[in-house]
Image: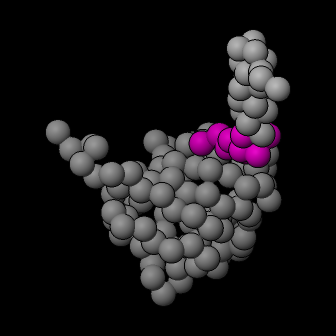
Amino acid sequence: MQLTRLSRLVIVFGTSIAIFGLMMVTVDPQVQYTVDEIMSEPERFDGENIFVRGIVLPGTMNYDEFVFTLQGSTEKLIVNFKESPIPDGFDEGRTIAVRGILQTDNSSDGTMMWIINSYEIQTGCPSKYEA
């Protein structure tokens, strides 16, 4: 049995639509926030999986406690990287993106602070930002 041209086009089109539909269902896009956006309403993101972008504040990298500070324009956020590897290109003063769970913790002086327990850290290509 030979398929007509129209039948073949319908099969190819239907298969393409089905593959596209499966891709859309399985991909979970995640919004990337800035540190300032997260810290404007941190309670809204408490316990949530977030994707945040900021600058690694120089002088805050602590390899003993596995923490550093991520800085926005006006706000700061502590990142616990115990469960995530540090990628190539990571350095203080660079813009990075962090995926993790936002949680509260008490600091040594008893005040509440917000921490991202990261599971992924991404850096951009340095040559992309150089003139």
Q: The magenta stretch spans which residues?
A: 23-32
Image label count: 0
Query: Where does residue 117 sit, x and y in percent of width and height?
Result: 65, 68
Give the farthest residue toward the right.
1
Q: Eyeballing the image, is 86 above or below 74?
A: below
The answer to which of 23 and 51 lies nearer the viewer is: 23
Q: Residue at x 52, y 79 (%)?
A: 66
Q: Residue at x 28, y 52 (%)?
A: 126
Give the farthest residue toward the top.
6
Colour convention of the picture: one colour
Snapshot quadrant of residue 115: bottom right
Q: Is residue 22 left or right of residue 79?
A: right
Quadrant of the frame with the N terminus = top right
The answer to which of 35 and 119 lies nearer the viewer is: 119
Give the farthest residue toward the front.
1
State whether residue 78 appears in this view: no
Q: Eyeballing the image, is 15 above or below 90?
A: above
Q: Residue at x 62, y 50 (%)?
A: 51
Q: Eyeballing the image, is 56 above or below 14?
A: below
Give the farthest residue toward the left.
131
Task: Say whether residue 41 is magenta.
Answer: no
Q: Is residue 70 left or right of residue 124?
A: right
Query: Where does residue 97 sit, x and y in percent of width and height?
Result: 51, 53
Q: Residue at x 60, y 42 (%)?
A: 33
Quadrant of the frame with the C terminus = top left
State whether residue 81 appears in this view: yes
Task: Say whether residue 27 is magenta.
Answer: yes
Query: Where does residue 79 sit, x and y in percent of width and height?
Result: 56, 66
